[in-house]
Image (tube, coloured by chain):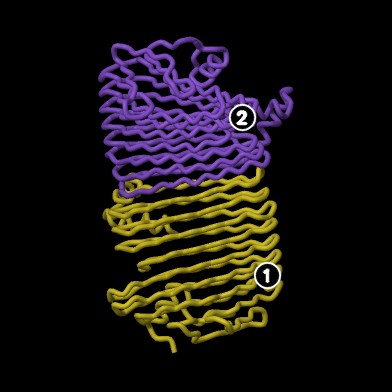
Chain colours: A purple, B yellow
Amino acid sequence: MLNAIDKHMLRTVAGMHDIPQGAYNIRKNGAGISRNTTANIEIRTKEDKPGIDIIVKPGTKGESVHIPVILTAEGLEDLVYNTFDIGEGADVLVVAGCGIHNPGDMNARHDGIHNFIVRKGARVRYVEKHYGEGTGQGQKILNPKTIVELEEDAFAEMELVQISGVDNTKRDTEARLHKNAHLLLTERMLTDGNQFAESKVQVELLGQDSSVRIISRSVGRDNSRQIFYPRVVGLNRCRGHVQCDSIIMHEAQISSIPAIAAHHADAQLIHEAAIGKIAGEQLIKLMSMGLSESEAEETILKGFLK
Amino acid sequence: MLNAIDKHMLRTVAGMHDIPQGAYNIRKNGAGISRNTTANIEIRTKEDKPGIDIIVKPGTKGESVHIPVILTAEGLEDLVYNTFDIGEGADVLVVAGCGIHNPGDMNARHDGIHNFIVRKGARVRYVEKHYGEGTGQGQKILNPKTIVELEEDAFAEMELVQISGVDNTKRDTEARLHKNAHLLLTERMLTDGNQFAESKVQVELLGQDSSVRIISRSVGRDNSRQIFYPRVVGLNRCRGHVQCDSIIMHEAQISSIPAIAAHHADAQLIHEAAIGKIAGEQLIKLMSMGLSESEAEETILKGFLK
């Protein structure tokens, strides 16, 4: 059922070399094509709109869910709503990449709206990789929206990665943290050519002793443009730390427009952002070890985005 | 001509214990009341609108201009346009405080629009202190707008301070830096009660090797609110560094919404912001030396805003 291109895309966006262990749902060109559930992880097709509900039983530990989406035809507009209900005390991994292989001159687009409810004391690690490729003129467009509710003592680690080949993206991430909930959000992005990327992150620290750390790393090459809007609002005794680093090259344009807002005297919020080119010393060091300038650049960028 | 309140206000906002040396122009309740010019610094009343032109001859070194404004009556709305033309190679100090003593229940408001042209190789140090006081219910409102053009090799050091007692302020600062021009902008602000303060700073680094450093320090007490929008755009090989630190107390709300935008691969831009309460260790240290908690707080805040 999976052809060579499908397998290549699944490997790239979800690290799948084979059918994964545990629960999974594979979506191709707008329809589910393969699914597995386990005793602890249920996957139900939504009845009111496209998408699935992933229900993780309370106390489930060490299991994973893979829900990759691939588009391999031009002219598609795929919209999907996925809801994750991570039961109390569970500890699971969710892998949710999206890859577009666009062979033609018409655009291909996927909008994924992901809703997370991470219940009391639960932990989730979420990995989302976005990738585009294709030989035609058709754009590869990916607009993910991720909404996260972290209940008391919940923890989420979210890794949002745009590897390459995505012509246009508007990323939108919202999180609401309750008492003693913690969120670690890392975002990594590479744009080149004429690509455009916008990323908005809005975190509300509602509960006492909640905390968030946002780490954003990006590389802008060629004529690409990137805009980042990380926003953290502290409404209780809480901590927030936002760190954005970007490497700018060629004719690229990068803007970082963060916001930290303290609405409570015990909110401690920090933001750091830096935009600059590759450090000259690093280049020279690698070139003195025998690498060409472009090899040295690639090595530095890979390390930066790892 | 100057009464006790006038003298107190002039001392507070412009450090004037007497008539200052050098050029000056004192404005009270919407009219100029005293002026002095020098061989090198001319002050002309504008003909088309309220305000003055301050013209500093090329090469003028070590001279100063004091142009304080005071309002000592309720119900006033004073609007003034001042233009500073700092001649090539000059090196001068400009002191431009504004103080409102509002004895009544009607508002008193001053809007100062300051235009700086700092010509090739010239240096200017600009100090602006804002202060309000008064026993009635009338608000003290100060809305400064400062527009700075730094020509090649020019340097400006600008110190914008809101000491206390200003109920409502919207600060707006714009700067355009040409080749090898440098700007050091420090802003210090204290709000308490129900005060509101908004500060926008927009710096465009147009010229090669231009640089800006923005240092903002603020303290928000009681129910006051502060919003900061520092923005640096790099359009050439340039450096920008924005550093915002705020101490939040009581029911205050503070937001820091910076923007750094690199439109050139050799633009290096950095932003750092932190909002938090007074460090507990600092308080304990001072209290162990015999200070009461509120004395210790005052000492720390003074040091922070100095």
Question: Label 1, label 2: how many angstroms apart (C-alpha)?
Answer: 46 Å
Q: Residues within 10 Å of mark 2 (few under 14, many from 20)?
A: some
Name the residue tied to disc 2. A301
Residues at marks 1 and 2, common chain?
Answer: no
Tell me the residue at 44%/21% (across/down): A31
Residue A94 marker: none
Tell me the residue at 46%/26% (across/down): A128
Q: Is residue A102 left or right of residue B209?
A: left
Vertical placement of residue B35 versus B14, above or below: below
Q: Position of residue B38 (x, y in %)?
A: 63, 82
Q: Position of residue A265 (x, y in %)?
A: 31, 49
Q: Position of residue A96 (x, y in %)?
A: 44, 23
Of badges 1 and 2, the one in the foreground is 2
Residue B37 versus residue A63: which sits nearer the camera?
A63
Vertical placement of residue B100 versus A29, above or below: below
- Return the chain for callout 2: A
Number of numbered discs: 2
| Res B13 quadrant in image | bottom left
Name the residue tied to disc 1. B90
Task: Inspect the image, locate mark 2, and give the three-letter code of the amino acid beneath it.
Answer: Leu
Residue B142 versus residue B122: which sits nearer the camera?
B142
Task: Inspect the image, locate mark 1, and give the three-letter code of the amino acid beneath it.
Answer: Ala
Q: Position of residue A169 (x, y in %)?
A: 52, 36
| Res A159 quadrant in image | top left
Residue A90 versus residue B71: which sits nearer the camera?
A90
Rendered-image quadrant of the C terminus of chain B: bottom left
Vertical placement of residue A39 versus A144, above or below: above
Q: Residues within 10 Å of mark 1 (few under 14, many from 20)?
A: many
Tell me the residue at 53%/34% (across/down): A217
Disc 1, SS: loop
- Return the chain for callout 1: B
Q: Residue furthest bottom?
A: B1
